[in-house]
Amino acid sequence: MPAPLDLRSDTLTRPTAGMRAALAAAEVGDDVFGEDPTVLLLQHRAAELTGAEGALWVPTGTMANQIALLAHCRPGDEVVAGWGAHSYLYEGGAGAAFAGVQFNVLSARDPEECRGFFSPEDLDAALTGVDASGHRPPVTLVMLENTHNRGGGRVLSPARLGALAAVARAKGVPVHIDGARLPNAAAALGVSMAAWGAQVSSLTFCLSKGLGAPAGSVLCGGAGFIRAAHRWRKALGGGLRQVGVLAAAGLYALDHHLAGLPRDHANARRLAAALARRPDARVDEARVETNIVLCEPVGCTPAELCARLAPWARALPFGDRHVRAVLHRDVEEDALAWALKGIGAGEGAQP
Ligand SMILES: Cc1ncc(COP(=O)(O)O)c(C=O)c1O
């Protein structure tokens, strides 16, 4: 009998033999001196992929977002973000602690409908009324998340971004994308990450989520932004030395794992269909756009539903109304087929 799938996150993937070999063979140097050839190669590749002038490897997505706040904002500034954004909800209060910013959270009134997104009109209103009287702090960054984690892996399309970016540009406010799962958004729409990169001041994407590297994110943007980011990475303790070993894993992931993301998305749709057959779970299958599946327990709590699913798959209670499952490259077909059968059989079924 297969072990239950671990669908708590796409960060659970382990480096493959090929990735470990690439890691072992990496040419390295001191990256604080800018002398690690593998890091330089990865940064060049990431800049090309996102259409940015430059890129900087950083250890985590959290550090990438925090560096963006530090580089774009000053203490006391306001950052506009959507409901549920990782950057204010799940980064340990770092935005307040280090950059000293406050967040204006839009779309919070109707999170079920908005799922983390907000309209150009809402953004325009949030950027209006900042006056010389000093009552309102200056808004110095619009933070967008793509795909949106709390929104269930929702994709912010390049067209939708265009409308938001036009409003921000008219007000002279830069836009940053927390693209921890931007590769999934690109795979879902069949476009390159440059479709978003060309429209924003900065963005980050993670190598350690669906792409399967053990660590690392890349922060991309203009030359001036990358210079500032380099300084803040050091200040936050993220200046690592022979880190080409991790960059090699990232390069390997870009070469070999990008192509696997559509399979994760297809598997997410299969899981949603199995969950939809259960009387104790409600899933809107049309909302499964990438590798994340959110379902609403019916007649039980998120923790109780997770316990019922546990013989087949580990999932996480997500807020007080949902259970989240995340598909990833370590999910094997045989084990998935077995788990889907059990999940679809409903409450009380035993392996
Ligand atoms: C949307 C989003 N942004 C940022 C991060 C932070 O990434 P890390 O765990 O590498 O700090 C995550 C992590 O899950 C995430 O889901």
Image: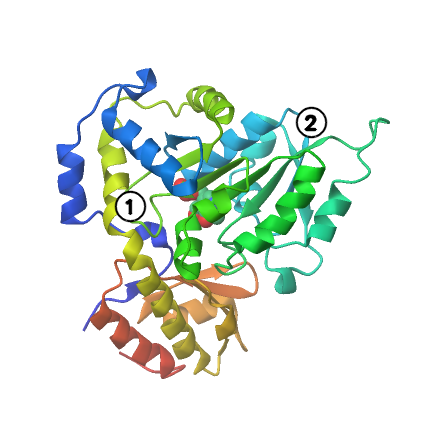
User: How many residues crowd mark 2 within 10 Å: few (<14), some (14–19), many (20+)?
Assistant: some
Is mark 1 in CB contact (under 8 Å) with mark 2? no
**Quadrant location of residue 41?**
top left
x and y, in percent, of residue 254 in the image: 29, 45
Kindly identify the residue that appears in the image at 34 percent across and 69 percent down.
Answer: 267
Q: What's under tag 1, amino acid-wise?
A: Leu
Is residue 104 in sight in this rendering? no
x and y, in percent, of residue 90 in the image: 52, 44
Which residue in the structure is indicated by mark 1? 254
Kindly identify the residue that appears in the image at 44 percent across and 60 percent down.
Answer: 189
Is the N terminus in the top left, top right, bottom left or bottom right quadrant? bottom left
Instruction: Kindly tell me whether mark 2's CB lies below 8 Å from ligand 1.
Output: no
x and y, in percent, of residue 144 in the image: 57, 46
* Left or right for 207, reference 94: left
Q: Nearer the viewer, residue 331 or 322?
A: 331
Sequence order check, earlier mark of 1 and 2? 2
Residue 28 disc label: none
Which residue in the structure is indicated by mark 2? 76
Indicate whether 236 appears above or below 328.
above
Q: Label 1: state its secondary structure.
A: helix
Figure colour scheme: rainbow
Indicate whether 319 appears above or below 64.
below
Q: What's under tag 2, amino acid-wise?
A: Gly
Indicate whether 181 appears above or below 99.
below
* Left or right for 142, reference 191: right
